[in-house]
């Protein structure tokens, strides 16, 4: 039997168990760093499966590392389980929140962590059967949506001895990821002024909100002079309490993105200058709180080629007519302009192949090797520590924007079949890497060349701590 078929056998034998885990996490969506129930479900399942589990990794109660086996090589499987704010949704093709304003799994992380658990079971079974030797680790990574978990875990050194790392992400296509992503800094700036009666004695006050707004204006002018790939987005997290009170405190939360860490750091320094200037203009003071930062994703092509091999062997996803009908109903609620914007990002041949499908379960060859996505992921940090490969699996309708209620509905229904496909691919890939020292050696050589031998340095300043309060107010 091949590594794919043995992994598929384990995954299939645990189908109902994996379905139940993904359903339980979908039904109790939790925001980053507060995924207590979701993490507990996975930790319990891993301990029952014979894994040794270390919790509270990197100062985060919902971060954990589960280990099975012993000796080399050591393969890491990265799992996630946090939800998004405001996306509560039933399994329905019309907007129907289960809890008004509540969170929902609009990025499929209820599937993400469970598929990785299924893959870990496949590797465990292969070790027990004597087919492979080594160690498999499941990394429970919280707060991906705010780019926190893996960065703080990386600072704690938990990835340092990996021979390779593997992960996946829900999406609308089955395809390996060979492009890069933007590096990022996440910083909150808080301005302090003097409160006063805004009508009676405004001259005795100094508005912290004025400082925030002038900073934002300055950043709008900064945009003209950064690279095309750079991005700055912000949210005012505290703008005062009442219009007749000059706000003594106001805060703004920034994401600074660019294709390289060096450019992110340059733009962050410029952002700090703008904040200082805004404080000077408003006779306020400003302080910053560095929340998180991450590196661009560095795809290891050697590892990714193994992923692609197992994707072809495992596919297609076994979606049926009922799955496709529900996917079509969901797709009908997405505006044509939004769907077209999603499809326009695909190469022409891929777009032509998938555009007429509500669900596309076939594996799609890798594309976009020279491209950098506008988004960011702290998988990038892991990829600068060990050779790393990742892929997307088709779990929602083709052309549906991520972080949408339609995705939540799909992730509570037919998407679980895509989750099993992902578990099989991850399990087969991990087993092959553990059984093939020559491939791992090539992966390490490629990694050394791509990083120029430079050791990973955390983007976090020494005083940075996991931002529990910020993630709670998403």
Image (cartoon, rainbow, N blue to C red):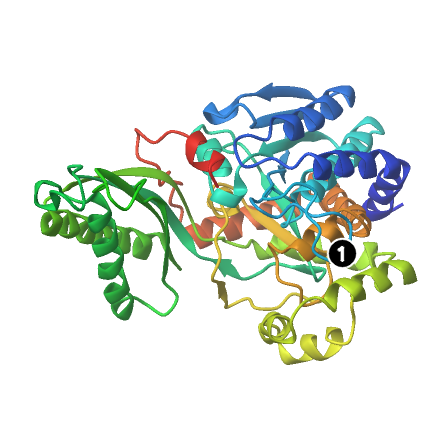
Res 373 visible: yes
Question: Is residue 206 rendered to the left or right of residue 83?
Answer: left
Q: Is residue 124 above or below residue 362?
A: above
Q: Nearer the viewer, residue 178 or 453?
A: 178
Question: Is residue 120 rendered to the left or right of residue 390?
Answer: right
Q: Secondary structure at mark 1?
A: helix
Res 71 visible: no
- Quadrant holding the N terminus: top right
Quarter where residue 318 is shown: bottom right
Q: Residues within 10 Å of mark 1 (few under 14, many from 20)?
A: many
Residue 120 in the image, given as x and y percentages of width and height:
73, 34
The residue shown at (82%, 39%) is 19
Residue 11 in the image, given as x and y percentages of width and height:
84, 40
The residue shown at (32%, 38%) is 290
Q: Nearer the viewer, residue 376 or 291?
A: 291
Question: Is residue 416 rendered to the left or right of residue 190?
Answer: right
The residue tagged 1 is 311
The residue shown at (81%, 33%) is 126
The residue shown at (75%, 62%) is 330
Question: Is residue 14 rendered to the left or right of residue 366?
Answer: right
Residue 341 in the image, given as x and y percentages of width and height:
58, 73
Q: Is residue 240 above or below residue 34?
A: below
Q: Nearer the viewer, residue 230 or 86?
A: 86
Q: Is residue 297 above or below residue 135?
A: below
């Amino acid at each position: 039997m091949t590594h794919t078929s043995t992994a598929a056998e384990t995954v299939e034998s645990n189908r109902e168990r994996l379905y139940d885990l993904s359903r339980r996490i979908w039904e109790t969506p939790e925001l980053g760093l507060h995924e207590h129930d979701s993490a507990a479900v996975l930790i319990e399942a891993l301990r029952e499966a014979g894994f040794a589990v270390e919790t509270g990794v990197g100062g985060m109660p919902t971060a954990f590392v589960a280990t099975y086996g012993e000796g080399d090589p050591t393969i890491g499987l990265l799992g996630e389980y946090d939800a998004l704010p405001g996306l509560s949704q039933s399994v329905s093709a019309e907007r129907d929140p289960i809890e008004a304003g509540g969170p929902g799994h609009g990025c499929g992380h209820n599937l993400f962590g469970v598929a990785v658990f299924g893959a870990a079971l496949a590797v465990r079974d292969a070790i027990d059967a004597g087919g492979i030797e080594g160690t498999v680790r499941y990394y429970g990574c919280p707060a991906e949506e705010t780019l926190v978990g893996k960065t703080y875990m990386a600072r704690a050194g938990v990835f340092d001895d990996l021979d390779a790392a593997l992960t996946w992400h829900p999406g609308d296509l089955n395809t390996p990821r060979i492009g890069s992503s933007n590096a990022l800094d996440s910083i909150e700036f808080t301005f302090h002024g003097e409160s006063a009666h805004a009508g009676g004695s405004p001259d005795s006050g100094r508005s912290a909100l004025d400082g925030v707004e002038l900073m934002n204006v300055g950043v709008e002018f900064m945009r003209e002079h950064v690279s095309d790939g750079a991005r700055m987005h912000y949210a005012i997290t505290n703008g005062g309490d009442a219009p007749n009170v000059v706000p003594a405190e106001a805060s703004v939360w920034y994401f600074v993105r660019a294709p390289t860490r060096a450019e992110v750091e340059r733009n962050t320094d410029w952002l700090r200058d703008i904040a200082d200037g805004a404080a000077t203009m408003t006779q306020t003071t400003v302080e910053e709180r560095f929340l998180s930062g991450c590196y661009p994703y560095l795809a290891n092509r050697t590892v990714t080629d193994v992923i692609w091999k197992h994707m072809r062997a495992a596919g297609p996803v076994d979606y049926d007519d009922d799955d496709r009908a529900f996917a079509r109903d969901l797709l009908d609620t997405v505006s044509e302009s939004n769907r077209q914007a999603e499809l326009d990002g695909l190469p022409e041949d891929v777009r032509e192949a998938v555009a007429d499908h509500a669900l596309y379960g076939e594996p799609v060859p890798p594309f976009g090797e020279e491209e950098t996505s506008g988004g960011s992921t702290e998988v990038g940090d892991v990829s600068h520590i060990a050779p790393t490969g990742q892929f997307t699996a088709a779990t929602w309708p083709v052309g549906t924007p991520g972080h949408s209620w339609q995705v939540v509905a799909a992730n509570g229904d037919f998407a679980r079949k895509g989750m099993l496909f992902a578990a099989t691919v991850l399990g087969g890939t991990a087993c092959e890497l553990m059984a093939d020292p020559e491939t791992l050696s090539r992966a390490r050589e490629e990694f050394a060349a791509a990083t120029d031998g430079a050791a990973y340095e955390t983007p976090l300043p020494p005083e940075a701590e996991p931002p529990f309060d910020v993630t709670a107010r998403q």
